[in-house]
Structures are given as structure tokens and as C-alpha cells.
């Protein structure tokens, strides 16, 4: 996107360049249907994102893309400024109102906290937490440059899994890092009826889940596809990332048990079997796969891969002798899923079984599913009725249920 225009049309001519780029970005998000809530549009027009990304050009700061701001020694992203479109989507899920108290896990650059402060207004308050002191120091400096001091935004260096009991309870809690489970502190520090929005991993596929606290459990108000850097610290999940030598930048994200990397590399170097899945509403297959398949694995690529494209979701058997992945070719609303299989037929047969089950449920899309979180101690929660699938986390039983047509 040209940062000075939206769809080829000048935006707010005569504005200073930074303001023009900011206005163009918001207009672009509105035209793409990613931003529909007026208060969030007002906040994104008001908060200067380039002040939170001083190390990059304003053109890049106002592009609709994520910007990695901290890398590990082995070049794994540790912190980033989220893509503006995803920020808008999650803020709409969060539904912040003036005067609310909001907790954010993952301060990052401080930009999202600034937007939250704009939405809560002078009568509200935002607390944001990050695990690294250098990130916290930078976020404080960025917020100060934008005119937001500690009276509006408290920035803390802590393990986000602990929340911040000093400012609890919170009306809203949001995570800008991926989580494998819902920490007890987040649930306990949220008011009953309050909302938690987080990128939640379900068999390695992340969904931005808006979860409303209802008594002893939680229920999703909306689900959106997403992809975030994983939470670090004591509450990090069991997922492991495996880089495969000789696989053209391919990396696997999986939950144990997982075969050795050498065996995986050999499996995925075998001649593939490739076929197209001619299914209507096929995008729903990947969510069904994440909900139904216990050995789901995400394949990630640094650049487009000849077999896996930009990424894929699939199954690798624990024995390491069979793999099957589904990826998506094309663009827009007409996506063509392609299946790639390696080794024995086991994983491919499991994929076929998932697709058959998905069809029998009426080919549900993501909007047709709801998550319900039950305490692990609730032995009565899990029941089989044909429309629900279950996933055990450390603290919760996640019920993934297809909703009946309205």
C-alpha cells in the first residue's frame, strides 16, 4: 500500500506526511473491512504509530505489517509490533469502553497500550506488562513521547502469567502474545462478566479468542484466525519449534511427542503425493483439523516454499513414518486447499477422516464454532454428543463446539 494513499486516492491532502500516512492506513483498514468500530478508528488516527517504532522509517511504521523489534541470538523473533489489521480485529473483539480498567500482557512497543488508553479515556486506566526490562524501558519512553504518562498507563516488568493483582480486578484483559493455556491469574483478576482476548493455541493453530468470564468458566464471544509470538516465562506452553536441515527454511511447530529432527527431515524429503481437495467452504477444514486431530503440526516457512507455500497445517504420526499437510493456494475468498502427503498413508487417512467428520457437521466455518472453558477439576464437564471436541490444557478443559444454525 502506498502510505500516502488508500486504493490510489489521496487521503487528507495538505496534512503533514506522518498524519497523512496514518490517515491512509486507517482508511485502508476500513476499506478492507478489518476496521469497522468507529472509536477504534478514531484512536488509530490519533495515536502516532511512528513514535513507537523510531528505528524504522515512517513508511514502514504505517504499512499494514508486523515489525519484529527484538530477536534472539539464534534469530527467533522475541517481540514485535503487531500488524495494524490484527490490532484492529483484536480491539474490536475486546470491546473496551470509557472508564474501564484494562490489563495487557505483552507491552511490546507500547503502541497497543496507547490505543487502549485512548479507548478507556481519562477516567480509565491501562496496565501493561512485559518480561524484558529493555522492552519495558522502551515502551515507557515511547508512551511518554506520545504524551501518556504513568497516570494513564502503568508499564511493569514482570512475568505476564502472574498478571498484576495490584490494579485488579480488570474489566478487560488482552494478550498480544500467544498462549497455550489461560493462566489462573488472568481468570481470577477478571471481573465476572469481563472479557479476556488472547491468541490461544489449539493443537498449534492460534485463534484470537474473545472469552467472557461466566461464573467458574469462560465462553467465547468470537474467534478470529491469528499468528503471534509465543509467551515466554514460567507459563510458556509445551510446543516445540524444530528447524529442519535441508528443507529450505521449513520449521515445524508441534506438541510432544515428536520424532527426532533428522527423522522428520528425511520424511519430508521423500517424494510427496499432492492432490487438490475440491470442497466448498474449504477454509473451514483447517479449523476442523486443529479441533479434531490430536497430532496436528504447523509448518512455517520464512519465504514461500515450493510444497508448503507460506505455511500449512497437518499431521505427523508419533512414529515419524507418515505426514499429511493442507495448505491454501490462491487469494481472496476463493481458496483452493491442497493436500501434500509423505511416507505411509496413516496421516492422509486421518486427514480424510477429519474432512468426512467436518462434512457431516455441515462444513462449519470458524464463525460456526464456540469455545467453552471448564475447570480441569469439573469431572462432569466432558460429555460426548457428536458436536463437541475436547482438549485438555493444564488448567482448563477446552470444549470446541459447533453451534446450531440460528
Image: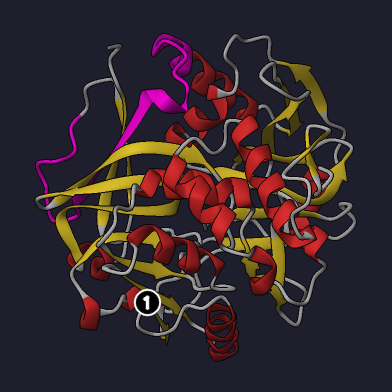
Q: Residue at x 74, y 61 (%)?
A: 18
Q: Nearer the viewer, residue 38 or 295?
A: 38
When the figure is inspected, residue 108 is found, relative to residue 203, above or below; the finding is below
Inspect the magenta stretch and tell me whether residue 258 lies in it: no
Q: Magenta segment range?
A: 357-383
Residue 163 visible at all: yes
Q: Quadrant of residue 182?
A: bottom left
Inspect the magenta stretch and tell me whether residue 380 lies in it: yes
Instruction: Give the residue at mark 1.
Output: 152
Q: Residue at x 53, y 60 (%)?
A: 239
Q: Nearer the viewer, residue 200 or 66?
A: 66
Q: Quadrant of residue 367?
A: top left
Q: Residue at x 57, y 48 (%)?
A: 86
The number of numbered badges drawn on the structure is 1
Residue 256, percent from left and from top? 52, 58
Q: Nearer the viewer, residue 255 or 260?
A: 255
Q: Quadrant of residue 76?
A: bottom right
Residue 203 visible at all: no
Q: Residue at x 46, y 18 (%)?
A: 358
In the rendered view, how is the structure colored?
secondary structure
Residue 142, percent from left and from top? 59, 80
Residue 174, percent from left and from top? 39, 60
Helix, strand or loop at disc 1? loop
Q: Which quadrant: the N terminus?
A: top right
Residue 232, percent from left and from top? 51, 74
Is residue 254 shown left or right of residue 365? right
> For mark 1, does the 10 Å Cα neighbourhood hold few (<14), some (14 to 19), or many (20 or more) residues?
many
Is residue 268 shown left or right of residue 378? right
Q: Which quadrant: the C terminus?
A: top left
Amino acid at each position: 500500500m502506498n502510505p500516502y494513499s488508500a486504493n490510489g486516492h489521496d487521503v487528507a491532502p495538505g496534512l503533514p506526511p506522518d498524519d497523512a500516512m496514518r490517515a491512509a492506513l486507517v482508511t485502508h483498514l476500513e476499506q478492507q473491512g478489518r476496521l469497522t468500530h468507529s472509536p477504534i478508528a478514531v484512536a488509530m488516527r490519533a495515536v502516532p504509530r511512528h513514535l513507537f517504532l523510531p528505528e524504522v522509517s515512517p513508511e514502514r511504521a504505517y504499512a499494514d505489517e508486523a515489525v519484529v523489534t527484538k530477536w534472539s541470538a539464534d534469530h527467533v523473533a522475541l517481540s514485535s509490533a503487531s500488524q495494524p489489521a490484527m490490532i484492529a480485529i483484536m480491539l474490536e473483539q475486546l470491546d473496551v469502553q470509557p472508564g474501564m480498567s484494562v490489563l495487557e500482557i505483552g507491552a511490546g512497543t507500547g503502541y497497543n497500550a496507547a490505543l487502549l488508553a485512548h479507548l478507556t479515556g481519562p477516567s480509565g486506566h491501562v496496565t501493561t506488562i512485559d518480561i524484558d526490562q529493555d522492552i519495558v524501558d522502551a515502551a515507557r519512553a515511547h508512551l511518554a513521547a506520545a504524551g501518556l504518562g504513568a497516570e494513564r498507563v502503568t508499564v511493569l516488568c514482570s512475568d505476564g502469567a502472574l498478571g498484576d493483582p495490584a490494579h485488579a480486578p480488570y474489566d478487560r484483559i488482552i494478550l498480544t502474545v500467544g498462549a497455550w493455556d489461560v493462566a489462573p491469574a488472568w481468570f481470577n483478576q477478571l471481573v465476572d462478566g469481563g472479557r479476556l482476548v488472547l491468541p490461544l493455541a489449539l493443537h498449534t493453530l492460534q485463534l484470537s479468542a474473545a472469552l467472557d468470564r461466566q461464573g467458574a468458566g469462560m465462553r467465547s464471544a468470537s474467534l478470529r484466525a491469528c499468528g503471534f509470538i509465543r509467551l515466554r516465562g514460567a507459563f510458556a506452553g509445551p510446543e516445540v519449534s524444530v528447524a529442519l536441515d535441508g528443507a529450505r527454511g521449513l520449521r515445524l511447530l508441534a506438541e510432544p511427542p515428536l520424532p527426532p529432527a533428522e527423522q522428520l527431515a528425511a520424511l519430508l524429503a521423500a517424494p510427496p503425493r499432492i492432490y487438490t481437495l475440491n470442497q466448498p467452504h474449504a477454509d473451514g477444514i483447517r479449523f476442523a483439523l486443529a479441533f479434531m486431530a490430536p497430532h496436528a503440526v504447523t509448518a512455517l516457512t520464512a519465504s514461500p516454499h515450493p510444497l508448503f507455500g507460506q505455511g500449512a497445517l497437518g499431521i505427523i504420526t508419533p512414529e515419524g513414518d507418515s505426514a499429511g499437510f493442507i495448505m491454501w493456494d490462491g487469494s481472496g475468498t476463493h481458496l483452493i486447499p491442497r493436500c501434500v502427503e509423505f511416507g505411509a498413508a496413516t496421516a492422509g487417512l486421518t486427514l480424510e477422516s477429519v474432512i468426512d467428520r467436518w462434512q457431516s457437521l455441515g462444513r462449519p466455518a470458524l464463525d460456526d464454532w464456540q469455545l467453552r472453558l471448564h475447570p480441569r477439576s469439573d469431572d462432569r464437564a466432558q460429555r460426548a454428543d457428536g458436536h463437541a471436541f475436547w482438549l485438555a490444557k493444564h488448567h482448563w478443559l477446552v470444549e470446541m463446539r459447533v453451534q446450531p444454525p440460528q
